Image (cartoon, rainbow, N blue to C red):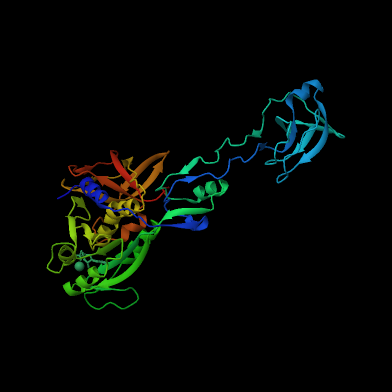
Amino acid sequence: MLTLEEARAAILAEVSPATARESVTLSQAHGRFVAQELRARVDNPAFDNSAMDGYALRAADLVVANFVLPRHGECRCGDAPGRLSPGTAMRIFTGAPMPEGADTIVIQEDVRLEGDKVVFPQTAQPGSHLRRRGEDFRRDDLLYPPGRRLSAFDLALLSTAGVADIPVCARARALVVATGDELVTPGTPLRAGQIYESNSLATQLLLRELGAEAVNGGTVRDDPAALRELLKSSTDFDFVITSGGASVGDHDLVKQVFAEIGEIKFWKVKIKPGKPIAFGRVGSRTHFFALPGNPVSSLVTFKLFVEPAVVAWHHGTSHMLQLSATASNDFRRHPGRTEFLRARLATEGGKLTATALRGQGSHMLGPIRETNGFIRVEADSAGFRQGESVVAIPLSADIP
Ligand code: AMP
Ligand code: MG
């Protein structure tokens, strides 16, 4: 059985990254992965300009004129750069182009107006309150390498840099399928022995959060013929993600059918929850994940295995942030597998604490309400005591 790290490495080694790309607008590029180096089209700032509201002048003129200069002209945002008459001060506003001949801005709070004269109470440092052309970046500077996922802030930078069409990686197409004879869609009454299906929607939404296109493949019965049909029709997807039927029961057929039609790279990983996960390929395009059916196992294995695979497919790199936290309760167990406990992370005086939540059964979704991270327990560990250091994995930045 592979360890967590071996399984993750095996997946990354096997992923065939996207070759298709498309060009999108700035607003469409949010959350997409850059397909080709993005370089600045303009200098930023595009021209020397004022960082403050005040007066533009030549610093040397101040001393010569005994700190009083006639006010002459005005320069606003959007004006073309003017020219400073020697021995005068020009009114200027934040972002307005520096007039030719001026080398300094004196902020308006530091001056006094007397009629059409400006009185300067102190000397000015040449170059003060000036934003220099290109001091932020220059035309043709590299802004983003391929594989970078674009955030709202990134799109502000690209807008500033005049990049209007963005080459991005195609979105991965992922088919999501639940398997199990007992599963019923919420909204219909349950008959005896039935349960509501809960993995498929969460999986589709997690995929969309990663920038992939998720297709709802519905629920398939525990029937080899139906599963075969499904897998055979999945070869125009980049990913197929099933849940359920990946274990060792008589009706756990997904792995068997998958082995018939595709190639299994591994089955079972030394983790808890989520041990019976299978990964492999169908045809030359499709990456196949058979996730376990228990709702918590399905969520955990998605985060551990599907997420890095989908990001890598888009040429990106994903990081599982692992922080050290202080345990706020005891947790004891038998060593054996790397375990991910649903946990509540919090901060106390700027330091991270982690509480292992009650109800760690992989069928128990109730603790999800309080879960904002995992505690990672190493395979050889027998658990931890309150006050000890543990490894915490935040699932969001929403940590009180
Ligand atoms: P399996 O992996 O098919 O052996 O299923 C393990 C457990 O998870 C069983 O209790 C199933 O009823 C349950 N289960 C499987 N798939 C789902 C699903 N999509 N939604 C909710 N529970 C599921
Ligand atoms: Mg099942």
**Residue 200 picture location, percent across and down:** 31, 66
Can residue 267 be spotted in the picture? Answer: no
Q: Residue at x 30, y 39 (%)?
A: 387
Residue found at x 78% / y 35%: 90
Decide which of 334, 152 is in the foreground and name it: 152
Residue at 36%, 58% (x, y): give it: 369
Residue located farthest toward the left when viewing the structure as drawn: 250
Is 339 on the left or on the right of 71, as rendered?
left
Position of 229 relative to 79 (above/below): below
Ligand 1 lies in quarter: bottom left
Q: Position of residue 180 (x, y in %)?
A: 22, 70
Give 240 or 284, whichever is nearer the viewer. Answer: 284
Above or below, comparing residue 329 to residue 202 in the picture: above
Q: Is residue 256 left or right of residue 388?
A: left
At 13% from the left and 65% from the top, the residue drawn is 249
Q: Nearer the viewer, residue 251 or 313?
A: 313
**Up-down relation of residue 354 to residue 248 (above or below):** above
State the image coordinates of residue 206 (x, y, percent, origin top left): 36, 59
Number of numbered callouts drawn: 0
Q: Is residue 50 left or right of residue 243?
A: right
Q: Residue furthest right?
A: 115
The answer to whether residue 355 of the structure is visible from this angle is yes
Q: Residue 280 placed where, x, y %?
A: 21, 57
